[in-house]
Image: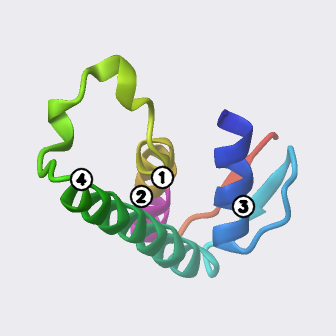
Amino acid sequence: MFAENARRIFEIIGRPESARGVITAEQVPDALQRLTEAVAQEKAQQKEASADTGNDEPESKPTQARGVTFSQRAFPLIEMLRAAQKKNAHVSWGT
């Protein structure tokens, strides 16, 4: 399940899927924007789906039935990209 989310994140930010890599300081703002837009889109789709089923409160489902959403998986990377943007720093993984 995590691998699916990782592939999706790489696709969204326009990076090839790899065990090692870097998002340069110059690429951070674009990657952050793409990822936050994807999360916002997912949340809008979830809200729309809840409205279609007549359930306005996603929290009303039991915790075990909900699972971990894409936005929850993406959150740590979004926070890392925000911090990198403030410091004009690169983000690297697998090194």
Sequence-first tag of 3 and 4: 3
Sequence-first tag of 3 and 1: 3
Residue at which label 1 appears: 80
Q: CA distance from mark 1 to mark 4?
A: 35 Å
Badge 1 marks a residue whose secondary structure is helix
Residue at which label 3 appears: 10
Relative to the observer, which residue lies in front, 73 or 93? 73
Q: Residue 44, percent across and down?
A: 31, 68
| Three-letter code for the amino acid on which mark 1 is drawn | Met
Relative to the observer, which residue lies in front, 78 or 73? 73
| Three-letter code for the amino acid on which mark 4 is drawn | Thr
Q: Residue 88, percent across and down?
A: 51, 71
| Three-letter code for the amino acid on which mark 3 is drawn | Phe
Sequence-first tag of 3 and 2: 3
Callout 2 environment at 10 Å: few (<14), some (14 to 19), or many (20+)? some
Which label lies toward us, 3 or 4? 4
Callout 1 environment at 10 Å: few (<14), some (14 to 19), or many (20+)? some
Callout 4 environment at 10 Å: few (<14), some (14 to 19), or many (20+)? few
Q: Residue 66, percent across and down?
A: 37, 31
Badge 4 marks a residue whose secondary structure is loop
Q: Residue at x 29, y 21 (%)?
A: 63
Relative to the observer, which residue lies in front, 56 or 22? 56
Query: What numbered label is drawn on residue 83?
Result: 2
Badge 3 marks a residue whose secondary structure is helix
Q: Is residue 57 left or right of residue 83?
A: left
The colour style of the image is: rainbow
- Give yes or no for residue 78 being in the magenta stretch: no
Cβ–Cβ below 8 Å for labels 2 and 1? yes
Q: CA distance from mark 3 to mark 1?
A: 15 Å
Sequence-first tag of 1 and 4: 4
Residue at which label 4 appears: 53
Q: Is residue 55 above or below residue 66?
A: below
